[in-house]
Amino acid sequence: MDAAHSRRVLEHIGVPSEVAGIAAYILFFERVRAEGGVAILKLDGQRGPGDNGPYTVVITSERLRHGHVRRDAETLDGAMDFCIATYGYEVWGIPMPSRS
């Protein structure tokens, strides 16, 4: 997933383009919560080399195909981009970008 696609999903739910980073993520989490979902952001200081990364994002919702989406990543943006795109596709019907 890329940041541009995540931005499109955030704009779809009304997050202004000037709101970015953690402020945009909180607005996204609030929307998930308002729809009955649960969002968890974990920063794990005990992870080291060879792990999947210190940032974990988990979203649970009956509206998701498998009931949840989770991503461990080296960056917060990487974890969030995946979860925002997946939730946007599965719950709101926002198409994933085509791969060329």
Image (cartoon, grey):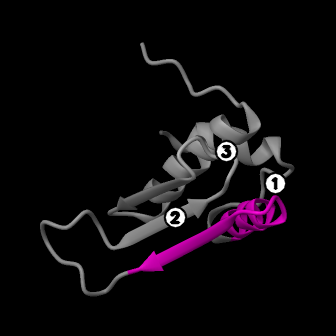
Question: Mark 2, mark 1: which one is toward the viewer?
Answer: 2
* Magenta segment includes 31: yes
Where residue 42 appears, x then y in whole percent?
46, 78
* Number of dots carrying numbers: 3
- SS for dot 3: helix
- SS for dot 1: loop
Residue corresponding to mark 3: 7
The image quadrant of residue 36 is bottom right
Residue 58 - label? 2
Q: Nearer the viewer, residue 29 or 97?
A: 29
Mark 3 → mark 2, Cα distance in angstroms: 19 Å
Q: Residues within 10 Å of mark 3 (few under 14, many from 20)?
A: some
Q: Nearer the viewer, residue 19 or 11?
A: 11
- SS for dot 2: strand
The residue at the point 70 percent across, 38 percent down is: 8
Specify whether 12 is left or right of 91.
Answer: right
Mark 2 → mark 1, Cα distance in angstroms: 20 Å
Mark 3: amino acid: Arg
